[in-house]
Amino acid sequence: MAATDLEKASTERAVATSVDPAEVPSAAWGWSGESPKTFRIAGWFVVIALLAMTIGNHQGHVEDIFLVGMAGLLALILVADVFTRRIPK
């Protein structure tokens, strides 16, 4: 019968400083990581684009509600991201 003891989980996070190009082919081009600054800039661009779509020749305002709501939700997520990144771990 297998043992029922469990190993203690480690609370340390592993951070890879170098990536083997054999495992990740795009590492040779420098594409082996996330770019949070670029994602945040793109997020704010999308918020502005959604709000710009409210200007138009449509007569109903149902789509305006959805556009403003989605822009507000995305802006809230981006602002929350700013505050959660400032909290020291």
Image (spheres, rainbow, N blue to C red):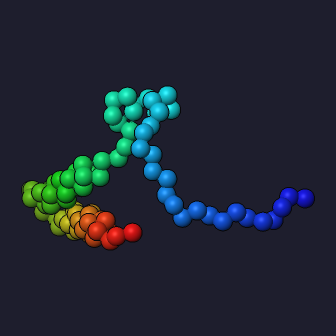
Q: Position of residue 28 (x, y in %)?
A: 37, 28
Picture quadrant where residue 59 is located: bottom left
| Left or right of 76 on screen, residue 13 | right
Residue visible at 19% across and 57% down? 44
Q: Position of residue 39 (x, y in %)?
A: 27, 51
Count numbered badges in the picture: 0
Quadrant that contains the N terminus: bottom right
Q: Position of residue 31 (x, y in %)?
A: 35, 36
Q: Is residue 4 visible?
A: yes
Residue visible at 15% across and 57% down? 48
Residue visible at 39% across and 31% down? 26
Judge by depth and name the residue closer to the eye, 37 or 43. 37
Taking 83 as reference, is 23 above or below it?
above
| Left or right of 52 on screen, residue 38 | right
Picture quadrant where residue 21 is located: top left
| Left or right of 86 on screen, residue 24 | right
Judge by depth and name the residue closer to the eye, 77 or 38. 38
Judge by depth and name the residue closer to the eye, 18 or 54. 18
Q: Is residue 66 visible?
A: no
Which residue, as the protein is rendered here, is positioned at the far right?
A: 1
Q: Position of residue 16 (x, y in %)?
A: 45, 46
Quadrant that contains the C terminus: bottom left
Picture quadrant where residue 58 is located: bottom left
